């Protein structure tokens, strides 16, 4: 994920990414291998409800070239991303 920060700091142009709207680790892995710089696992609108599903998706994104980011389900549900 440091490459995203480094490119932003250098001003290397746009970074491309996508939101993962499904809870599928397979889809996360496939998209991470498509050349996106970052992928957001959308826990607010996607059916990612358990920490094991979240872990599987983060690991799947990490298999490719994309940096994983998380969108928390609600701003007051910190436990969902702190586990």
Image (cartoon, grey):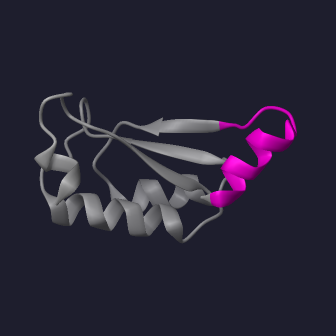
With respect to residue 64, does 27 lie above or below?
A: above
Q: Is residue 60 visible?
A: yes
Q: Quadrant of the C terminus?
A: bottom left
Q: What's the magenta bit mostly, secondary-structure-wise?
A: helix
Residue 12 is inside the magenta segment: yes
Instruction: Report the residue at 68% width, 48% height from top.
Output: 5
With respect to residue 19, does 32 lie above or below?
A: below
**Left or right of 25, for residue 83:** left
Instruction: Report the residue at 85% width, 43% height from top.
Output: 10
With respect to residue 40, does 13 lie above or below?
A: above
Instruction: Report the residue at 12% width, 48% height from top.
Output: 79
Q: In which quarter of the image is residue 26?
A: bottom left
Task: Name the foreground residue: 58 vs 30.
Answer: 58
Residue 76 is inside the magenta segment: no
Q: In which quarter of the image is residue 51?
A: bottom left
Q: Quadrant of the N terminus?
A: bottom right
Residue range corresponding to the magenta coloring? 2-16
With respect to residue 24, does 59 lie above or below?
A: below
Task: Name the foreground residue: 7 vs 18.
Answer: 7
Number of numbered discs on residues: 0
Q: Position of residue 4 (x, y in %)?
A: 68, 49
């Amino acid at each position: 994920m440091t490459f995203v920060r480094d490119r932003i700091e250098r001003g290397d142009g746009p970074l491309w990414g996508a939101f993962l709207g499904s809870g599928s680790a397979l889809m996360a892995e496939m998209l991470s291998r498509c050349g996106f710089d970052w992928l957001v696992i959308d826990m607010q609108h996607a059916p990612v409800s358990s920490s094991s599903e979240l872990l599987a998706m983060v690991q799947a994104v990490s298999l490719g070239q994309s940096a994983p980011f998380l969108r928390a389900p609600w701003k007051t549900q910190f436990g969902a991303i702190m586990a």
